[in-house]
Amino acid sequence: MKALVKSRAEQGLWLEDVPEPSVGINDVKIRVLKTGICGTDLHIYQWDAWASATVPVGLTIGHEFVGEIVEVGSNVADFEPGQVVSGRCRNCLAGRRHLCAHTAGVGVNRNGAFAEFIVLPMTNIWLHAPSVDLDVAAIFDPLGNAVHTALAFPCVGEDVLVTGAGPIGIMAAAVARKAGARRVVISDPNAYRRGLAEKVGVTLAVDPTATTLREVQRQLGMQEGFDVGLEMSGNPAAFREMLENMSHGAKIAMLGIPSKEMAIDWNRVIFNQLTLRGIYGREMYETWYKMTVLIESGLDISGVITHRLSWRDFEAGFEAMQSGESGKVILDWRG
Ligand SMILES: [Zn+2]
């Protein structure tokens, strides 16, 4: 079968013929239909320090996918051929999380989804509702992170601040809106990404290098600060400015990973009675259920998908990712 393989210890990926994976008794074999390229994949493509220390040469990469089951192992009772599924791979990483030592698994140190077929243990399979669009299904893994973060605290009637407009930040903003937020402000220095965020319906997309959040509050007629913060950037300056612009008793969910220790003004956390909550991974079935229901009730995150390409054009997809002028890039593996 065809697969995108990290076959040399240098920048790039190579399209190769590799053996089809075999199916163990607890495994599910899936024909890959569509895949999403993740920031994690880009680090592997670029072969940075994290990738070269973590990823074995010869690996098929990729972890965001949707596919159709073609075969199940003899112990597998809950799945059958023909079902449309994704993997739950936990490798969609916000901010600088590629530096996280815990990153492991599909497409990082075991063979991944950028291939015609993938085999996964049945415990790592997500069955899709029939109504879910295939492009959206391909990015269920990062959407899961966005949903888990955005719903960490109630958003109904609240003013929500999202720092970092990568695809996960933008999807989290859309979820907060859908979950009843009054205003959703997102900040990112990248103009292209702010444009994408505007497409999913944020109140305001702010360039933090040009406008302070204090000024944004004035523009929006806000007096007391944001009620809920979603920190998706891992950027210390962004986090500090968030802390300065939260209301008393505000709650902050943190998904972005800083590259190293970061100092904050703890007096502000204490005197303003802020709640900070770290988010890692997600509550699998609960999050899956919420994602499905949100989509069925009209959550539209398709605006975050900016490129739809054939797997043969994977180089163009990685170029778009490297340019910074992209949201999610989808590769179609059919035909
Ligand atoms: Zn991912």
Image: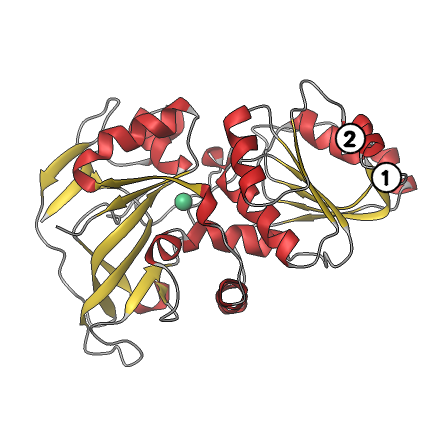
Local packing at callout 2 (Cα closer than 10 Å; few below 14, some 14-19, many 20+) is: some
The structure residue drawn at horizontal position 23% and vertical position 29%, both measured from the top left corner, is 315
Question: Which secondary structure lies at badge 1?
Answer: loop
Q: Which mark is residue 222?
A: 1
What amino acid is found at the position of numbered circle 2 in the picture? Val
322 sits to left or right of 213: left
Instruction: Pinpoint residue 270: horizontal percent, then vertical percent.
Output: 88, 41
Tell me, yes or no, if residue 99 can be seen here: yes
Residue 3, quarter of the rendered image: top left
304 sits to left or right of 197: left
Q: Is residue 15 above or below residue 182?
A: above
Q: Which residue is mark 2?
A: 216
Marks 2 & 1, CB-CB < 8 Å contact? yes
Question: Which secondary structure lies at badge 2?
Answer: helix
The structure residue drawn at horizontal position 50% and vertical position 37%, both measured from the top left corner, is 97
For ligand 1, give the image quadrant: top left
93 sits to left or right of 135: right
What amino acid is found at the position of numbered circle 1 in the picture? Met
Instruction: Pinpoint residue 247: horizontal percent, then vertical percent.
Output: 86, 43
Distance between the alpha carbons at the discs numbered 2 and 1: 8 Å
Between 139 and 134, which is closer to the camera in this rendering?
134
Between 158 and 127, which is closer to the camera in this rendering?
158
Q: Is residue 326 above or below residue 200?
A: above
